[in-house]
Image: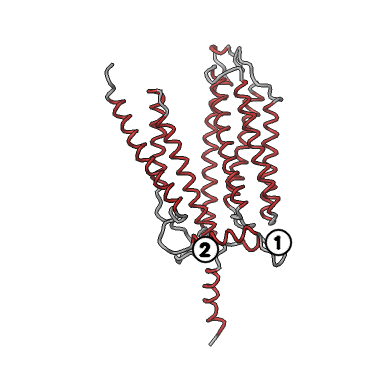
């Protein structure tokens, strides 16, 4: 279907960048309105618009690539660089939360008892649920690699099983972490410990949810035969993101859960 | 006249008409000869539909549901924008109790 005399993809005019920007405006203004007027309507509306925009934008990309064949090798290479740069920016995002954690924990102040964990904080036992969560994410790294090899070797049902297992493990992690949050004896307001713990693990949990959603999308696309054994960048991007989420958890576990206890 | 050289553009043209993108044929290599994976037939229909050259942009090419989603999103944005400005005004000029 390529009608140009070059290998690049010049996209059709699309409303999604504008609706995305407006959705972000509604989300941010909505947060301010929530905090000052105790009204969440604008915030929720912004969230809905952003979700609608994301679904339609990515739906369009699937159409352009799978159905119209517009993703040439050059285009796919650009996508690869894009995903690598995005994940790098996410690494830097988490780096700042680890910096905050070490800032507070390496030189504990008088206000928290000159100790880490601070006086009075009952930390999670690292060899209980946190260790199970570590094993779950490591296993999910194996299953997503299994799925990838299945895809490259034209084994449809093995890819399906691998993807399904990865999604189930991701959901299991999220459920366990939610239980931990409910059972925690400290809150985000409980000194620097609570703040660093919940912000770092909270953002990680959000990324697990995003990664799981990406994998579920890949699962549905695979069931609809969108991927071929040689061209499946959407799947690879999801797998890269998932490995990134796993590595962040390993750092969280080693520093905040284990060293920090 | 070199018939092969003449045939080459025709081959290229017919290749571009055969819709599947790279590797789709390879992925069904494990299926028995003569049998086509059922998913392939469904997706061939999708290829045909989205490759119709009618000038309709990709975000509306799916049909009526695309239009519904698009106008709903646009309406949501319009309403949300008004709500934003309403809030900015009320934050700048709060009502005196």
In this rendering, the answer to whether A59 lies above or below A213 is below
Q: Is residue A39 left or right of residue B22?
A: left
Residue drawn at point x = 29 percent, y = 26 percent:
B92
Residue drawn at point x = 68 percent, y = 50 percent:
A159
Tell me which label, 1 or 2, sits earlier in the chain. 1
Under circle 1, the secondary element is loop
- Where residue A114 sits, quadrant-wise, is top right
Residue B1 x %, y %: 53, 88
Residue drawn at point x = 67 percent, y = 40 percent:
A140
The residue beneath circle 2 is B48
In this rendering, the answer to whether A2 lies above or below A140 is below
Q: Is residue A162 left or right of residue A232?
A: right
Q: Is residue B85 left or right of residue B36?
A: left
Residue A193 x %, y %: 57, 20
- Where residue B90 sits, quadrant-wise, is top left
> Mark 1 — on which chain does it sit?
B
Residue drawn at point x = 58 percent, y = 11 percent:
A113
Q: Residues within 10 Å of mark 1 (few under 14, many from 20)?
A: few
Residue B75 visible to an observer of this rendering: yes
Under circle 2, the secondary element is helix
Residue A96 x %, y %: 52, 31
The residue beneath circle 1 is B31
- Where residue B53 sits, quadrant-wise, is bottom left
Q: Nearer the viewer, residue A142 or A44?
A: A44
Q: Nearer the viewer, residue A44 or B21?
A: A44
Residue A102 visible to an observer of this rendering: no
Residue A35 x %, y %: 41, 24
Q: Residues within 10 Å of mark 2 (few under 14, many from 20)?
A: some
Q: CA distance from mark 1 to mark 2?
A: 23 Å
Q: Is residue A116 left or right of residue A127?
A: left
């Amino acid at each position: 279907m390529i009608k140009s005399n070059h290998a690049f993809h010049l996209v059709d005019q699309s409303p999604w960048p504008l609706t995305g920007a407006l959705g972000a405006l509604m989300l941010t203004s909505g947060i301010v309105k929530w905090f000052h007027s105790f009204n969440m309507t604008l915030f929720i509306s912004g969230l809905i618009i952003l979700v609608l925009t994301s679904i339609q934008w990515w739906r369009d990309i699937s159409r352009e690539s799978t159905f119209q064949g517009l993703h040439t090798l050059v285009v796919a290479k650009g996508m690869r660089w894009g995903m690598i740069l995005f994940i790098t920016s996410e690494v830097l995002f988490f780096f700042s939360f680890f910096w905050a954690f070490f800032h507070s924990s390496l030189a504990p102040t008088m206000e928290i008892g000159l100790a880490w964990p601070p006086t009075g904080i009952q930390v999670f036992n690292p060899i209980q649920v946190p260790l199970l969560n570590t094993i779950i994410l490591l296993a999910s790294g194996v299953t997503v690699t299994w799925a990838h090899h299945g895809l490259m070797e034209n084994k449809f049902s093995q890819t399906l099983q691998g993807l399904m297992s990865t999604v189930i493990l991701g959901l299991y992690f999220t459920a366990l972490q939610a239980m931990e949050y409910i059972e925690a004896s400290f809150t985000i307001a409980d000194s620097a410990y609570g703040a660093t713990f919940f912000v770092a693990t909270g953002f990680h949990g959000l990324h697990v949810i995003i990664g799981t959603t990406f994998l579920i999308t890949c699962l549905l696309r695979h069931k609809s035969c969108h991927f071929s054994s040689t061209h499946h960048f959407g799947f690879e991007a999801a797998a890269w993101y998932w490995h990134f989420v796993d590595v962040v958890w390993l750092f969280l576990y080693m520093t905040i859960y284990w060293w920090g206890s | 006249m070199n018939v092969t050289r003449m045939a080459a553009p025709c081959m290229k043209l017919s290749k571009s008409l055969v819709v599947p993108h790279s590797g789709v044929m390879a992925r069904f290599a494990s299926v028995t000869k003569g049998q086509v994976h059922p998913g392939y037939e469904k997706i061939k229909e999708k290829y045909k539909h989205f490759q119709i050259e009618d000038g309709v942009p990709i975000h509306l090419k799916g049909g009526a549901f695309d239009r519904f989603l698009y106008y709903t999103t646009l309406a949501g944005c319009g309403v949300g924008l008004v709500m934003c400005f309403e809030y900015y005004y009320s934050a700048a000029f709060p009502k005196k109790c």
